[in-house]
Amino acid sequence: MLQVQFIKENTELIIERLKKRNFDAAPILKEVIALDDKRRSTQVLFDDTQAESNKLSKEIGMLFKNGETQKANLLKEKTVQLKEKTKALSEVVNDTQKALNDLLYTIPNVPHELVKPGNSDADNEEVFAAGDVPNLHDGALPHWELAKKYDIIDFELGNKISGAGFPVYKGKGARLQRALISYFLDKNVEAGYTEVQVPHLVNEASATATGQLPDKEGQMYHDAQDNLYLIPTGEVPVTNILRDELISEKDFPICYTAYTPCFRREAGSYGAHVRGLNRLHQFDKVEIVRFEHPEKSYDALEGMVDHVKGILADLKLPYRILRLCGGDTGFVAAMTYDFELFSTAQDRWLEISSVSNFENYQANRLKLRYKDANNKKYLAHTLNGSALALPRVLAGILENYQTPEGIEIPECLVKYTGFDIIN
């Protein structure tokens, strides 16, 4: 979330930048400033009252020690009143702080200056494209029909076991899925990311720290008994590795990669555009997360984009990169690049990765700070990206690599699969 001091010092800038999101911040920022002023003034009054109470308590002790009982009892009556006042003031401070935090949670991150205004994905800006769209043979099929033809993914069996959006990968389909996971992790480790295995359930504090709560409750599966959430992305547990930490400036960059299953309710998702692997309730993803010095985070963002480009170049899949407009940028991100894969059989673009810089928005929630050489403390910057989300990459491979003889396997994956064609 935004820092109150940043809001006070940059009110007009924030109002203008948030217009890119079609978000009217003016009334909320005014209320934030008023609440903070109230909290600060009440805190001063509380501190003064408590100091006076502590001073009187010492005087009372001396009076009793010197045998001046009557004077001591008179002052005790005053301390009782002061304690009642401090209790009331403490409640006001706490209530005001809670109201302030609740309000701050409703303010999205401030878009970077390069982010363009816009209302939806139609306003996103294409910044790069690569790869040749293959000319498929007559009778080429979409991936859900290929999956059935070669018996590698069973959507009906998944529906029987769990429901729609939970496919069962079989035989060479399961091995191709596993190959992609291993390949992505190896590429990330080679690029300097430390591999971690993390929990797939997180507590409320973790989900709040990365911005899933209170913004996206309805998109997550929730275990009410233990108040735990199934992760919607590996970003959540991996980023929380450094929650409530104070690190040294010399430790930057800190880079993690993790494979996790991901769980999203995706309520209201129906129609042909979500068939097959296009949208699932459970899917696999390999994530990259970086913790960076604020002065280097946008260089790191570009580096993450180049890294994902390298993976897609190895896979020889046609793709494009979009810089999202304000209206399509996620709530906690300052800038996001989306990678989209062209599905030849479906004749449409499919999102396969988002790479984002959150600047210090997440770090403020995480309470993640670093200290410089002078021991001054600052909020770090956090970034994350998919490298990559598997379902649509797998769909792209099945569709773009299909031939009359079967589905060829990208050369970079053969050493992981142990076969070069599905037939």
Image (cartoon, rainbow, N blue to C red):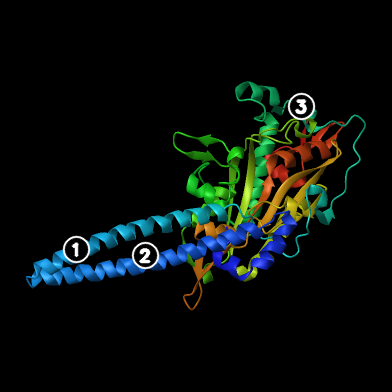
Tell me if 274 is positioned left or right of 109 in this view: right
Frontmost of labels 2 and 3 is 2
Q: CA distance from mark 1 to mark 2?
A: 19 Å
Residue 6 in view, yes or no:
yes
Amino acid type of the residue that numbered disc 2 sits on in the rendered structure: Phe
Q: Earlier in the sequence, mark 2 or mark 3?
A: 2
The label shown at residue 46 is 2
Is residue 407 shown left or right of residue 93? right
Q: Is residue 284 above or below residue 7?
A: above
Q: CA distance from mark 2 to mark 3?
A: 72 Å
Q: Quadrant of the N terminus?
A: bottom right
Q: Position of residue 39 (x, y in %)?
A: 46, 62
Residue lying at the far left of the rendered structure: 67
Where's residue 90, x and y in %?
A: 37, 58
Q: Nearer the viewer, residue 293 or 58?
A: 58
Which amino acid does the dot numbered 3 rest on? Tyr
Q: Which residue is mark 3?
A: 150
Q: Position of residue 148 (x, y in %)?
A: 76, 25
Q: Which residue is mark 1?
A: 76
Q: Amino acid at mark 1?
A: Lys
Question: Residue, x 60% and y 42% (percent of image)?
Answer: 232
| Residue found 72% across the figure and 63% down from its top | 16
Q: Secondary structure at mark 3?
A: loop
Q: Of helix, strand and loop, which one carries label 2?
A: helix
Residue 167 % position (x, y): 66, 29
Query: Does dot 1 land on a helix, a strand or a loop?
Result: helix
